[in-house]
Amino acid sequence: MSLKTFFSSVFLVLVLFSCAEDRETKFSSTNVTTSNNKLVEINIPKAIGNDEIAKNINTEINKVVSASLHIGEGTPNSETSIEENIENFNSEYNSFATDFPESTFPWEAQIDGEVMFQSPAIISISITSYLNTGGAHGNVHILFLNFDAGTGKRLENESLFIGQNDFETVAKTYFEESIEDKSILFDPENFQLAKNIGFSEDGLILLYNTYEIAPYSAGIIEYTIPAEELNSLLAINSPY
């Protein structure tokens, strides 16, 4: 190989590497509020760029955050912006305070998001919401969102695995190893696969929110399937 050909090859590799880096979705942390807001604190990741990938991810995050702020009966409107839902939350509290002036406990909402894991194949984001609307205690809820890194489309849990039954078998094994006292569970004899499944550097996190499989006193229950156990189970390109 001539010196000219060698340097041309090196240049091509560097260009391709640079292009791959440029295509990786970047995130910034953003605080969302309104001028009249006194009750809601929101800090979430925002995909940067005007391309379709960033748009798809941000749209899904906005839907989840908006739904978390929904108060009252009925299904939340997925087209309503976060800012509108912040205003609605404050308005609902003002109406409550007017109707029940003896109540001195203010409502509050705290929603935080973070990018848990990112690879050329998948992006995992967690959204943690805490709401207290005057009850005995507030409610914490965690939701994992998995996205196809190439399209920004949200991935349903079922699409992550080659064989759902094989995955559940592995998940059950690690679940039973992680729970020392099964008497705390509502149904200790029957395994229930977690609805929340998200990727981390260590492996796959499976998480049960409060009241899903155990009482409030048990708190949030989670366990991890190590990364090295996943390659034969995943339907997507290996993220590790």
Image: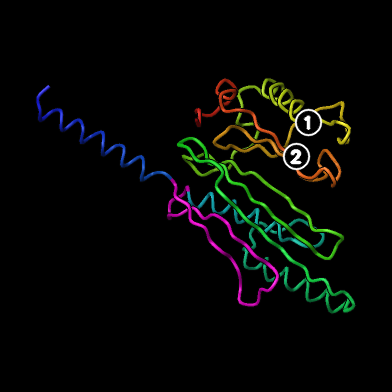
Q: Earlier in the sequence, mark 1 or mark 2?
A: 1
Depth check: give the residue in front, 81 or 174. Answer: 174
Disc on res. 165 = none
Count the labels in the image. Answer: 2
Residue 109, percent from left and from top? 71, 63
Q: Is residue 206 above or below residue 231?
A: below
Which residue is rendered at x = 73% and y = 22% of the image? 173
Which residue is rendered at x = 81% and y = 75% of the image? 95
Secondary structure at numbered mark 1: loop
Q: Is residue 168 above or below residue 112?
A: above
Look at label 1 and name its amino acid: Ile
Residue 14, percent from left and from top? 26, 37
Q: Quadrant of residue 161?
A: top right
Using a 10 Å C-alpha cutoff, classify the residue at mark 1 as few (fewer than 14 neighbours), some (14 to 19) or many (20 or more): some
Look at label 2 and name its amino acid: Ile
Q: Which residues are magenta?
A: 25-53
Disc on res. 221 = 2
Relative horizontal placement of residue 38, taking residue 154 as reference (left or right):
right
Q: CA distance from mark 1 to mark 2?
A: 9 Å
Using a 10 Å C-alpha cutoff, classify the residue at mark 2 as few (fewer than 14 neighbours), some (14 to 19) or many (20 or more): some
Colour logic: rainbow
Q: Is residue 11 above or below residue 138?
A: above
Magenta segment: does it hold 10? no
Which residue is rendered at x = 84% and y = 75% of the image? 104
- The residue where tag 1 is placed is 179
User: Are dots 1 and 2 in contact, CB under 8 Å?
Assistant: yes
Residue 77, percent from left and from top? 69, 59
Secondary structure at numbered mark 2: strand
